[in-house]
Image (cartoon, helix red, strand yellow):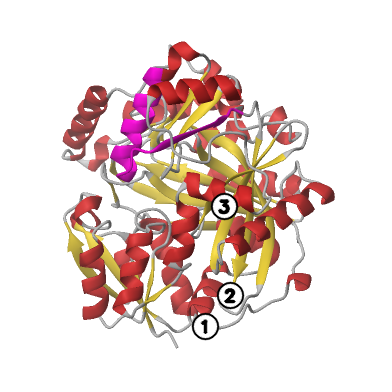
Amino acid sequence: MIKRILIANRGEIAVRIIKACREMGIASIAVYSDDDKQSLHVRHADEAYYLGPSPASESYLSIPKIIDLALKTNADAIHPGYGFLSEKAEFIKAVEDSGIIFIGPSSESVEKMGGKTSARKLMNKHNVPIVPGTIESVSTVPEAVKIAEEIGYPVMIKAAAGGGGKGMRKVNASSELESAFHLASNEALKSFGNQEIYIEKFIEDPKHIEVQIIADKHGNYAHLFERECSVQRRHQKVVEEAPSVSVDHEIREKLTTSALNAAKACGYYNAGTVEFLLDKKKNVYFLEMNTRLQVEHPVTELITGIDIVKEQIRIAAGEKLSFRQEDIRINGHAIECRIYAEDVENNFSPSIGQILHHRLPSGPGIRIDRGIDVLSKVSVYYDPMLSKVIAYGKNRDESIQRMKLALGAYQIVGVITNIHAFRWVLSRESFLNGSFDINFIEKEFMPLLPGKWKEYDAAEYENAVSILAALLKNKESEFKSETPCFSKSNKWIEKRYE
């Protein structure tokens, strides 16, 4: 029996896991860095312990520190959340060797599916359809040129250990390949500690569809249907919904069957997500498997009634699935918007500062998963996601309408957010009729922005952070609604969608 869980994460996902622990009568143990001393997850947990300095490499990514704390606090299990160490086979193996229960899959399964090339190789062997491309990493530019010419342009260069859009470049012609190869490889090394890349055919204007799977240690497998994740910026999902407006019964059967085959191929247990691309001809291609809890899991919980985090904990404790596949039905529709501290008008660059005002929306079918409160610090060291707004309704139209009302009532002051951009998305005809694809933001939103879009400029960003830090030392009363530091983008977008 699991009585004490150490949560090796921060922010909204740590708070989410704490809530599940509380409902199950399990003690929650939080960890924190210097920048997170006053964070919401620290205040909500039953116990909290200092982990290390603010840089993730010295705190949330430190395997020895986390294992040591878990042992010292007599934790029965560790929940990794998502991001950080959640998909590191090395970390999972260390947890397993320590005698502590890991709430997630085995290190062996993660090893098989964590690497994009090894996963593609395994899927190809088990007849799960993959995007045409390499199943081995590519190490030199001449080799990449040869492969790209065989596949045919455009192609995608991707980090073998990647995710979240990092280490990824689209190449339209051979003249672009050398530069893209080095950029992707260097970014992969910086982000994942692994510079291996692979190449696959670029699928024009696809849908991004994923299937939530869950399995226990007794050989029982089930799926919780699909999620639509095609609204993305910089290859990062920002709006997710379940079920997908693009999927009919026949496609759903292909997706769920392939997802379960993928899970069985690596002997998977616990919660995981198998991601696919759906092209214009309704062909299904395996993209990758995320061997962890997903950011967007709430939309699946709402349409199925299954608490995925609680199910994860029960499975880790050795229990069987609490339901059978035939018991699960799609009930209603749910949409999630990820609220980021970011300036959409400046290429979605992060907005750093302190939350000076935070008023949550409410109403029928509205759920907020958050990691912030008034005076919370939005740090330069971590992902700038603040919270998630989830709207549930009896159908898609009702969930969209409820989301619009919730976003209109959500107030965050102190940093720039993307809330108004979502209100634009939810009013766009291509979103409403379901014809949007993963290039929706790039094709329909970016051209509307004033000025010329530019690549991320590190010097400009550091200067902006310094200015904001100086401003935050002044009286809070100076931060009024007309202050440019957080209202410029919102006012502009508000005019656009109206």
From the viewer's perspective, tell me whether residue 402 is left or right of residue 253.
left
Query: Which residue is depicted at the point 25% across and 67% down?
Result: 66
Residue 41 within the magenta-colored segment of the rendering: no
Residue in the foreground of this view, choosing between 272 and 45: 272
- Report the amino acid beneath label 3: Leu
Few, some or many C-alpha atoms within 10 Å of disc 2 (few <14, some 14-19, many ≥20)?
Answer: many
Residue 217 in view here: yes
Q: Which residues are magenta?
A: 178-202
Answer with mark 1 or mark 3, whichever residue precedes in sequence: 3
Determine whether the residue tagged by mark 3 lies in a helix, strand or loop. Answer: helix
The disc, 3 or 2, on the residue closer to the chain's N-terminal end is: 3
Vertical order, 385 against 313 (above or below): above
Q: CA distance from mark 3 to mark 2?
A: 21 Å
* Vertical position of residue 202 compared to residue 287: above or below: above
Q: Quarter holding the N terminus?
A: bottom left
Q: Residue at x 50, y 58 (%)?
A: 291
Write down the residue under mark 1: 318
Please give the residue where the numbered disc 3 appears in the rendered image.
122
Q: Earlier in the sequence, mark 1 or mark 2?
A: 2
Query: Is residue 346 in view?
Result: no
Quadrant of the rendered image containing residue 140? top left
Q: Main secondary structure of the magenta part?
A: helix
Distance from Cα at disc 1 to Cα at disc 3: 27 Å
Q: How many marks?
A: 3
The residue at the point 64 percent across, 36 percent down is 426
What residue appears at the point 39 percent right and 18 percent down from the top-left corner? 178
Q: In 3D space, how far apart are the residues under numbered discs 1 and 2 (Cα atoms)?
A: 8 Å
Q: Are marks 1 and 3 in contact (CB under 8 Å)?
A: no
In this rendered view, identify the residue nearer to me: 131 or 256: 131
Label 2 residue SS: loop
Q: Which residue is mark 2?
A: 216
